[in-house]
């Protein structure tokens, strides 16, 4: 995200050593701290779960309770995915507005060609 451990620690009121412990997995991250992290990094909380393995997801108490029930398909908002955030940040790093426009047009053309819906004008 472009923040040093020290800068992230300052944003959260922690030392960089405490941030290192979270990063290494030496300390567990509670719900309120996860919320604070999402605010400091300017990402939705769901960002931290994007790449969760199916095994870890299946071990969730919520999923264990539902294992006996019919699964309900969930729609994932693409705006809350890590991939979307990375793509948008990368897109805006393209300094030349003409090149940026061409990348946008290419992405739209690829989406239409591969069966995506056209949105907007």
Image (cartoon, rainbow, N blue to C red):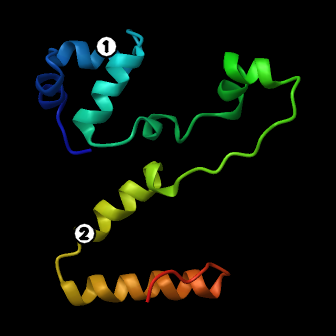
Q: Is residue 70 above or below residue 2?
A: above
Tag 1 secondary structure = helix
Which residue appears at 16% of the width and 15% of the height? Answer: 14
- Image quadrant where one finds the C terminus: bottom left
Q: Quadrant of residue 33?
A: top left
Residue 23 relative to residue 83: left or right: left
Q: Is residue 82 visible?
A: yes
Residue at (73% x, 24% y) in the render: 63
Question: Considering only vertical position in the picture, is 54 above or below 65?
Answer: below
Horizontal side of 9 relative to 23 (left or right) equals left
User: Residue 90 placed where, x, y %?
Assistant: 30, 64
What kind of element bears circle 2? helix
Residue 30 % position (x, y) = 40, 13
- Mark number, residue 6: none
Which class describes the residues within 10 Å of circle 1: few (<14), some (14-19), or many (20+)?
Answer: few
Q: Identify the residue at image location x=23%, y=12%.
A: 18
The local crowd at label 2, few if under 14, some if 14 to 19, many if 20 or more residues have their Cα within 10 Å, is few
Question: In the rendered image of this protein, does residue 100 appear above or below residue 10?
Answer: below
Where is mark 1, residue-wise?
21
Question: Foreground: 20 or 45?
Answer: 45
Q: Give how far across and how far down residue 84 sits, in percent.
A: 43, 58
The one of 23 and 84 positioned closer to us in this rendering:
84
- Residue 103 relative to residue 13: left or right: right
For the N terminus, the image quarter is top left
Q: Position of residue 69 (x, y in %)?
A: 86, 27
- What residue sits right under mark 2 in the picture? 92
Q: Quadrant of residue 15?
A: top left
* Earlier sequence position, callout 1 versus callout 2: 1
């Amino acid at each position: 995200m472009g923040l040093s451990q020290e800068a992230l620690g300052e944003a959260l009121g922690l030392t960089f050593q405490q941030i290192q412990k979270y990063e290494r997995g030496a300390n567990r991250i509670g719900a309120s701290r996860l919320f604070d992290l999402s605010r400091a990094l300017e990402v939705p909380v769901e960002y931290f779960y994007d790449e969760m393995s199916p095994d870890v997801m299946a071990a969730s108490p919520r999923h264990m309770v539902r294992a006996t029930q019919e699964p309900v398909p969930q729609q994932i908002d693409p705006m809350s995915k890590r991939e979307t955030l990375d793509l948008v940040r990368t897109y805006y790093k393209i300094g030349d507005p003409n090149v940026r426009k061409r990348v946008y047009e290419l992405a739209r053309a690829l989406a239409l060609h591969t069966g995506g819906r056209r949105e907007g004008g």
